[in-house]
Image (spheres, grey):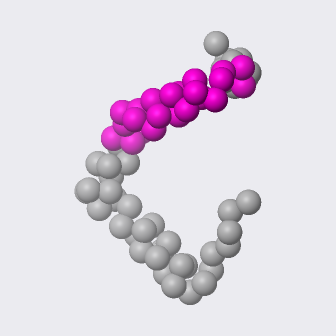
Amino acid sequence: MSLAEIKAAIQQLSFQQRAELAAWLHGWNDDEWDEQMKRDIASGKLDDVLREVEEDIKAGRTREMP
């Protein structure tokens, strides 16, 4: 099933069914990418990037997302 088909199917759901789906997705277990990110953060691999982001925020070099 393609993403477009999934989106079309979701549009056909009732409000209650969409709410149930949203709750289920919210409870989704971390996938491999999430687990890798956690390992990278714990090991310090992203410290430089996080520090740069913090500096950008403090310096006002951010903008609202569209």
Q: Main secondary structure of the magenta part?
A: helix
Of residue 21 and residue 57, the one placed in the foreground of this image is 21
Question: Which corner quadrant holds the N terminus?
Answer: top right
The answer to which quarter of the image holds residue 3 is: top right
Say whether residue 3 is visible: no
- Does the stretch in magenta take in 17? yes
Which residue appears at 53% of the width and 27% of the height?
A: 21
In this rendering, would 6 be left or right of 19? right
Which residue appears at 47% of the width and 34% of the height?
A: 23
In this rendering, would 33 be left or right of 57? left
Total labels drawn: 0
Query: At which x and y percent is residue 50?
Result: 42, 68
Extreme residue in the bottom direction: 59
Reply above or below: 18 against 12. below
Say whether residue 66 is visible: yes
Reply above or below: 24 against 51. above
- Does the stretch in magenta take in 50? no
Q: Which residues are magenta?
A: 11-35
Which residue appears at 25% of the width and 56% of the height?
A: 43
Query: At which x and y percent is residue 30?
Result: 37, 36
